Image (cartoon, rainbow, N blue to C red):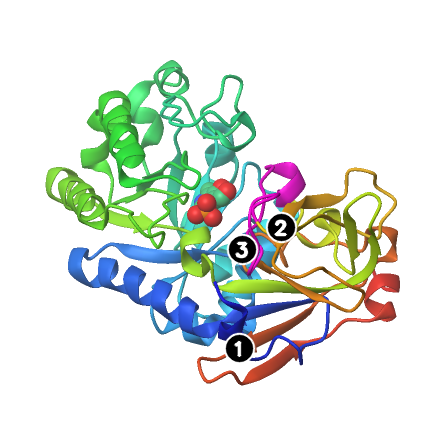
Amino acid sequence: MARASLPWLERVPTPSYVIDLARLRQNLAILKDIEETTGAHVLLAQKCFSMYSLYPLIGAYLSGTTASGLYEARLGHEEMGKENHVFSPAYRAEDMAELVTITDHMVFNSLSQWRRFGAQAQAAGVSCGLRINPECSTQEHAIYDPCAPGSRLGTRRAAIDAAGGRAALAGLDGLHFHTLCEQGADALDVTVQAVEQRFGDLLPAMKWLNLGGGHHITKPGYDIPRLKRIIRHLQDTYDVTVYLEPGEAVALDAGYLVATVLDVQEENGIAILDTSAACHMPDVIEMPYRPPVVGSGEPGAKAYTYTLAAPTCLAGDTIGTYSFDAPLAIGSRVVFADMAIYTMVKNNTFNGMPLPAILTADEDGTTKTVRTFGYEDFKSRL
Ligand SMILES: Cc1ncc(COP(=O)(O)O)c(C=O)c1O
């Protein structure tokens, strides 16, 4: 990606997240096509991207939102106002009265949660579902694998059978599974086969089936025709409405994190920036992964190599090692790509680090500042 494609680069404050509206629209158009051609409903998983100033735009393409609990459910209700779904591994009793008035679907993680809260949800007209665990791992990364041994996420078939089998699900309208993370339609295919094998006898009694998130639909090379075939197979075989709730696929590659070099340690090959992996892009450390940097190469591929690091106390708060055509100097700008997802929803002010501003950039290069943050934002949380 050439720097020339970022006309706003030198004029935005740093650190800042800059959302690329053209790419966001492109992703949304792909998801809308899936809705229109299959009849499946696509929901924004707000845990990934909750930039609600863009919900009117997102809502023009997608069916609605899904939430992890009361706060996200409120946000979806207030700011998008379309279909609103919620799943939590365990609900808080004190949240229920409000949750049932603002959600359309409520997914329970266990039969115990369903027994505890199901009647209240149904009395309010909420369609209730159960998250199942198909016990089918299609990935190596245990922290992101809800089917890993010992997982608390989803009800296993054995638990349903122990509770009386089909009868234990009486009153439930749907099933939900979420097992994928950044995966293709091939992994979904394997998972759906496992779901059909373990839970297929329960599906004819259901009105809907939610396939969760983790579908990398907007990544180049994703097999969209195969996804559509899987959706149609489920609709035709079980007469269910199919839901998808992607987070990443909505805002994949649709944002940058722009930083400034504060100091260069020539002797160590380190550039210290005004951003932090731990504070502004925690998945870099948690996942871990090496984010793309605009105009950079692998270490040694270009003339000048630097490890990009944070001004925090954490020794491991480094972002990665990259090479550049020109030396970095104090004041140089460094641009991390694919920074819309799981960033501003997870950031923090550890070490009193300022939160990055939030901006949008349109195709013609115009930018709009959505929010800036200051000392009060740090202080008011403590
Ligand atoms: C239940 C559920 N739905 C949807 C998602 C969104 O996943 P992704 O952002 O990978 O598409 C997640 C992510 O963890 C999830 O736990």
Question: Which residue is under mark 1?
Answer: 361
Q: Is residue 84 above or below residue 315?
A: below
Q: Which residue is mark 2?
A: 323
Disc 3: which residue = 341
Q: Amino acid at mark 3?
A: Ile
Note whether 114 is above or below 57 in the view shown: above
Q: Residues within 10 Å of mark 2 (few under 14, many from 20)?
A: many
Circle nearer the N terminus (2, 3): 2
Position of the C terminus, as image quadrant, is: bottom right
Instruction: Tell which tag, 2 or 3, sits nearer the viewer.
Output: 2
Q: Would residue 252 appear left or right of 48 to someone viewing this image?
A: left
Span of residues in magenta: 283-301
Q: Position of residue 135 (x, y in %)?
A: 39, 21
Residue count near mark 3 (Cα–Cα under 10 Å), binned few <14, some 14–19, many ≥20 = many
Hey, which residue is sitting farthest left in the picture? 236
> Considering the numbered disc 1 on the image, is that residue within a helix, a strand or a loop?
strand
Near mark 1 (Cα within 10 A), the count class, few <14, some 14-19 or many ≥20, is many
Residue 94 % position (x, y): 65, 49
Q: Earlier in the sequence, mark 1 or mark 2?
A: 2
Mark 3 secondary-structure assignment: loop
From the top left corner, tell me how far across and down residue 169 is, in percent.
33, 31
Is the residue marked 2 within 8 Å of ligand 1, measured from its CB?
no
Nearer to us: label 1 or label 2 = 2
Q: Nearer the viewer, mark 3 or mark 1?
A: 1
Amino acid at the residue labelled 1: Ala
Residue pictured at 46% horizontal, 85% vertical = 364
Task: Give the left or right position of residue 235, taking residue 363 as reference.
Answer: left
